[in-house]
Amino acid sequence: MKYGIAIFPQKHVQDFANSYRKRYDPHYTLIPPHITLKEAFEMDEANLDKAVDHLEKVARESQPFEICFHKVSCFHPTNNVIYLAVKNDQPLRTLHEKINSGILYHPHRYPFTPHLTIGQNMSTDELHDVYGSLRMRSLNLHTEVDRFHLLYQLENGSWSVYQSFLFKG
């Protein structure tokens, strides 16, 4: 089964992101706005209990923190993705490193860049047009992070929460 680990920001951030996602992100209906902590991975259900134990340990050792989305950026030319960039991303990087260890370790396809996608699978012309109109926009969207979620993918491609992990550190 395919799993992933993500953070869902507070509602005001999700509302802002969805104002763009509904037009520019074909995954809009499959998952709410999120920050991916661990990209989608295959895992045998026999290892699920060990993975949950690992994630519970990470949550016990983690403290809540706040992040700020401060600008719109893109991954072009690597990928035609537009996203909200995180100003103070070190807590997310640390959390990612803790999660992507032990039983859940997988090598990265790309360097970990904490972000919230607002547009993807766009043509290059569309990406340049949308990014050109958004890149000068100054953002100041703060959100509290006090939990992360283990997700699983359903047959229709949508994602559902398997378990949430509240920080206890």
Image (cartoon, rainbow, N blue to C red):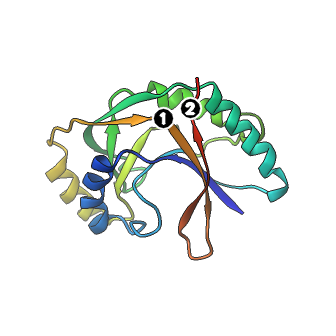
Using a 10 Å C-alpha cutoff, classify the residue at mark 1 as few (fewer than 14 neighbours), some (14 to 19) or many (20 or more).
Answer: some
What amino acid is labelled 2 in the image? Answer: Phe
> Residue shown at 61%/65% (left/top)?
153
In front here: 61 or 99?
Answer: 61
Q: Position of residue 37 (x, y in %)?
A: 54, 42
Please give left or right for residue 128 compared with residue 120 in the image: left
> Residue shown at 61%/70% (left/top)?
154
> Residue shown at 43%/27% (left/top)?
65
Whether residue 77 is situated above or below residue 21 in the rendered picture: above
> Residue shown at 55%/63% (left/top)?
159
Mark 2 residue element: loop
Please give left or right for residue 100 compared with residue 112 in the image: right
- Asked whether the beta carbons under mark 2 and mark 1 sit within 8 Å of each other, the answer is yes
Quadrant of res 108 = top right
Distance from disc 2 to disc 1, alpha carbons, whole Å, reads: 5 Å
* Quarter of the image where the N terminus is located: bottom right
- Residue marked by disc 1: 146
- Residue marked by disc 2: 167
Whether residue 40 is situated above or below residue 23 in the rendered picture: above
Quadrant of res 72 = top left
Total of numbered circles in the picture? 2
